[in-house]
Image: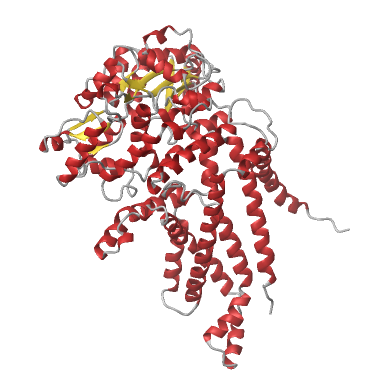
Amino acid sequence: MKKTSSVFYWMTIPAFILFFAFHTLPALQGIFYSFTNYIGFGDYSFVGFKNYINLLNDGRAFDAYIFTFKFAIVTTIIVNILSLLVALGLNSKIRFKNTFRAVYFVPYMLSILVVGYIFNHIFTFIIPQLGSQLGIGILSKNILGNMDLAWIGVVILAVWNSSGFNILLYLSGLQTVPDELYEVAKIDGADKWNQFKHITFPLIAPFLTINIVISMRGFLMVFDHIMALTQGGPGQATESITLLIYNGGFMGGEFAYQTANAVVFLFVVLAISFFQLKILQKREVDY
Amino acid sequence: MKSLHPIISILLAVFMVVGLGAVSFAQEVELEFFQNKREAVETFDRLIEKFEKENPEINITQNHVPDAETVLRSRLARNNIPDIMGLGGNFTYGQIADAGIFKNFDNASYLKDIQPAYKEMLQDLHEGNSNYGVPFTANANTVLYNKDKFKELGLDIPKTWDEFITTAKTIQENGGTPFYLTFKDAWTIMVPWNSLAANLQGENFIKQRLANETTFQARYQKVAERIYKLLDYGQDDVFGYGYSQGNQAFANGESFMYIQGVWAINPILEANPDINLGAFALPAVNDADENMLVSGVDTVLTISKNTDHPEAAEKFIKFLLKKENAQFYIDQQMTFSAVENVFQNDPTVVDLKEYFESGKIAPFPDHYYPSGMQVPNLIQGFLHRGNVEEFLEKLDSEWNKVQSR
């Protein structure tokens, strides 16, 4: 048997210890607390599955799940369509390509909270002013104060902020497609649309998979955006699961109950990511 | 030998500094003072400076963080408890007191100098009748008004709910904005809500609700109707603006009244030092003599049960409760003192004095709602939809749900 170099152990074990201590252990602790009535400090006792049973009857948590999914699905679709389009543009032979790339990537590097406050200002003052000048009734008020429209404000911020990263991934994907394939296609008389449909799109399928899984997972965890824009309001119109866990768990003194909620959410996110990988990987091709 | 000289003198100097340091470390007591009011940081700094001058052996470090309650909760979870704390007298305080984290002050001599009403308010937040903190200051939930604009229209301070609405109507008929409502920030809705609920919920509501002897549906009908009525007299887009925008707008004279507590006075004066402003208690009922001012413990001082230096910590609390220091604090902060015979004399809040003198004071109702209910957001949702019955039902069902957890 060939002896494995000990270097590889030195590369993996420290990271494993750190990951276990700061990630796995707290997660296990969380699962432990979800079976208690702990409020974050003081004494506690075991309550069995009570928190999970209460969770089933919690309309508020259900609403938060609905909002989170609606937000995550819509945002994922918009981000991926937009990013793919921009990446196709940036991959072609245009001028100022690098400037464009930099410009698109800048929002991703900015802190969501900081940008959130700027968007808050835009939604509160600038858009209503424009709206009333143009005589568009619905835009003449702050959309973040509107129960039916507030979530769109959150979507706009999320798309603007995160597209840069997805564009980058698609760009690297597009660069893996060999030029010869396009030349062959051109000889065969395929137009641009057919080239995209039959060559580009199937070949960047692995990147589509990773982009969709990453953005879906990220948007299911949406927190900063909402904190900066609406704090879950108006009413509970933009209350995401993570916000509910934070508000109820830390500020509302329901630490154990919201931990149970977090454990459920963990499994939901895991299941969705797994499901997406299975479905999307099926349609990846290899020429 | 000569070349060694500077090295030796440096070494000697180092030894001396280290030695002195060790001596002073041995004597000095380090205490952390964790407090939750951003506005009060500077005032406390000045008081601490004075205290340290009087007690050179004690060193107090003030710690203020945004979202102090959440931070404190997470610190308690790690058993990292500040020595001295200045907290709001609310539901969280009661929960921490119940967890047995604060010192028991029942035998403290200085507790005698505190107004009994505020001590009781705190006792009602937790189980038993012990004192786990010393009330330091009180705030008031008010309606702020622009005196100059009131004079222009010849308006007086309304004494009853009907007069209040008539005043608002008159302002509107003269083309003015009666209230600048900042309902984008859900917590600001609690200001009118608390005034209305305190006066309209009836005797012992919380106790009876806890015992399932009454419901929100039975007792909160009028509260919900009246808070909804306020929407008719707000500016355009009452859900579009938040607290800081409201302070700015009211300071610039965009509305006649502004439903906020006394804590908003300083930020408003900062935005416009020339504004001539006053404060009155929201008249929630139609019998003027019955109306009560909502006032709560703004800062309760308390000590960790397990602090290493209980005497030094107590010394600091005693120092803050001294008349001159309590007076200095409320003059700076535009709050009211929980210490007997220390009065707020600022002309801005002169109209509130009669309530304090006659004892027509009611606690904040929302300090007794379980915070897991997140009532502000529930009210915000109701103000959007406007369905009173559905809303009160929701309050009851959320209450039951949170209680059963």
Q: Which image quarter: residue B136?
A: top left
Horizontal arrangement in the rendering, residue B29 relative to residue B42 (left or right): right
Residue B226 versus residue B107 in the image, above or below: below
Question: In screen coordinates, is B373 left or right of B354?
Answer: right
Q: Residue furthest right?
A: A1
State the count of labels.
Answer: 0
Left or right: A5 with respect to B296?
Answer: right
User: Can the viewer see residue A273?
Assistant: yes
Q: Nearer the viewer, residue A5 or A170?
A: A170
Q: Which part of the image, by quadrant, shows the N terminus of chain A?
A: bottom right
Judging depth in this view, the residue of B209 and A164 nearest the camera is B209
Give coordinates of residue B398: x percent, y percent.
Answer: 52, 38
Pick the residue in front: B368 or A35. Answer: B368
Name the residue rendered at 36%, 34% in the picture.
B222
In x, y percent, where is residue B62?
42, 26
Residue B5 visible to an observer of this rendering: no
**Viewer-nearest residue: A3 or B285:** B285
Which residue sits at x=58%, y=85%?
A: A182
Asked which quadrant contains residue A23, the reply is: top right
| Quarter of the rendering occupied by the C terminus of chain A | bottom right
Residue at image point 38% right, 16% down: B117
Q: Residue at x 61, y 82 (%)?
A: A198
- State the image coordinates of residue B272 (x, y, percent, origin top left): 20, 38
Q: Is residue A213 left or right of residue B296?
A: right
Q: Position of residue B161 (x, y in %)?
A: 26, 32
